[in-house]
Image (spheres, rainbow, N blue to C red):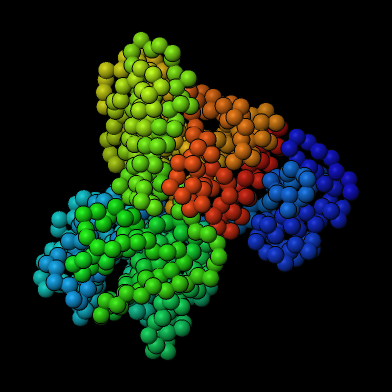
Amino acid sequence: MRCRTSVGFVIFHTGSSCFRRIVAKTSAHLSGRRDCESGNLDTCGFDGSLKLLSAGRWYEACLRAGPSLIGSADYIRLVTGSGQGRYKKVTSMSGIAAAFLLPWSSSHQTVYDRLKHMLPKLSLRGQAGVGIAAFMHDKGVRYKTASRPHELRAIDKDEQDLEFTPHVAIAHVRGRVCTEGESDDQPTPNRRATSRQLTISLDGALVNAREIRAELVAQGRTFAGRTDAELLLKLVGHICERDYWRQGLRVKYENVFREIDERIDGAISALLLDTEGNLVAFRNRYGLRPLEFMQTDDGFLLFASENCAFTGLRGKSDQIVPGYIKYVDGKNGHCLDRSVSDSQRAAKLCAYETLYLGSPDTSIQGRSHLETRYSIGFSLGDLIAHRLPAEPAAPIIVSSMPHTGGPYADGLFSSLVASGVNAERREVIETQNSERTLIGPSSERKRRIAHKYRLASTDVDKRTILIADEALIRGDTSRTVTNMLLAAGLKAVHWGIGSPPVVAPNYYGVNIESIDELAFWQIWKGLPAQQRKQSLLFKAIEPYVLKTIEGKIAASINAATVTYLPLPRLTSLLPSGSEGVDLSPFTFEMPTPAGQTRANRDLYNLVADRHNAA
């Protein structure tokens, strides 16, 4: 075998059998196909094309591989073709809820009353609108909408039918204002004339949506839009029609969702309502999106994305276990739990739930997100204290990024005061609207950022401010806020970040589609070769390299300093450590096979582009 090396790369002559075995194994790693590991490159089925880079028959590598693939080599660079065009779809963070009135209940409350109680508590998951589907025997399904989770006063008024008193209803809190030509209105009904009516509310996203959609289109299914809710609904309907409706059989939802759980890759929690008033709650095997359940003492079965929705209600509550459905019979209210997954993979909740998306009042293993976020802020204090001016002329202002940074800032402030830092806790930034700036296309996000933030306090001239935030992802929001504060007369802006650098995409509802948009990777491209290589360890970035990255990110957003929380500290502060939380944003260890394949390809191409540019 002939090989030559460059910094961080191994380049193999393509005529060697070793090279062919490595590429075959790499392709197997990307495609998840074990039958490729024999070393037969021609049968690997890799969905990109290997490109010849020079007449000397040399292939380069751009994929970071583990020892199981390439022994002692650190990297292989595999330049892939563009493959198929990217499937563009509409996804967003959201919340779901349902209420089922049991036949024996003597409560004067209605399912609408219970949704009015729950949905405002899920408002952090979405501010772009609420949709509700309610069912009553002999009258079918009725749909209602509201502009905000807190504006539900009129949802129980049906002027056309005052006798419509549903026993079950499902709801969806939408997290994104869609652009023209898009729609993510849920609950989503199927409108195919030959199908029984089904309605679904979904939280999360499918990574392999494109492949499933292509299969259904090939079988004659048509789509009105590009949402994962419609896609999942079509898949449910397809299985029901194939196995039950055509034969006049009663649907066995356990079997339906077992097939679905096997076929989908992604993060899904969903509520399904059928034409008999049956309700199915489903959480797929990966467990990335939460789904909670409560049976109240006064005779309701309630479902919600977070257990904060049940605050103030009396009853027994628990989570829907990943890989399970909870089926509620529409006639008698019997509630059954059924496993729909044989997977032995440990389920993990998405880290963004704990750090950002979830309500502070939601609890995991008896500990609220508010407590966790406060502890993270407190831990940041001793890292930041020595970076601040030793004896500031005026107290350092400790502020937060609304609306989720408050607990981080509270903990950070307490830690600084305990360390003897002269500080005051004051909010300096406020929002003019409630739209999240994390999600959406770049142009849409920039518009939101430009119009969202303003000063809440003008008494800041020549002061130093420390802003606490849960994450620094792209840097555009941080840059906008920093520039606004400097323009208002502040002397210096420091940032305390309650997580490590975000290094990975998120295809599971958070809409981070490419690593190239992340602040970490923009800085990584300009690092010296050895630091680039070392930083790709992600979980074990050396402190001196992390400090370099922090300094360069600070300069890129015009801040005095940026301080990240190291990964070991973060895991020590989470309710279940690293066992029950998906830390892929910071480790690049994606929680699903298709997600890992896609993220790997993104990483390899970025590394290849940087190497070629050099």
Q: In this picture, is 144 found above or below 75?
A: below
Q: Is residue 190 above or below residue 519?
A: below
Residue 212 visible in the picture: no
Q: Quadrant of residue 492?
A: top left
* 82 to the left or right of 267: right
Residue 46 quadrant = bottom right
Query: In the drawing, does residue 110 fall left or right of residue 235?
Result: left
**Could you tell me residue 407's position as x and y percent?**
34, 36
How many numbered discs? Answer: 0
- Please name whichever residue, 490 or 432, is drawn nearer the observer in this view of the structure: 490
Single out the residue that lies furthest toward the right: 1
Question: Picture coordinates of residue 502 (x, y %)?
Answer: 52, 40
At a point 27% along the width and 66% down the height, the residue shown is: 295
Give the quadrant of residue 427: top left
- Outermost residue on the bottom side: it is 247
Is residue 586 visible in the rendered image? The answer is yes
Residue drawn at the location 61% of the way across and 27% of the way down: 544
Observer-nearest residue: 520 or 569?
Answer: 569
Which of the image's four quarters has the C terminus? top right
Q: Position of residue 98 (x, y in %)?
A: 28, 64
Give how far across and how far down residue 563 sits, in percent.
48, 28
| On screen, residue 344 above or below 516 | below
Q: Residue at x 57, y 27 (%)?
A: 547
Instruction: Name the residue located 22 percent from the left edge and 60 percent from the top edge.
Output: 314
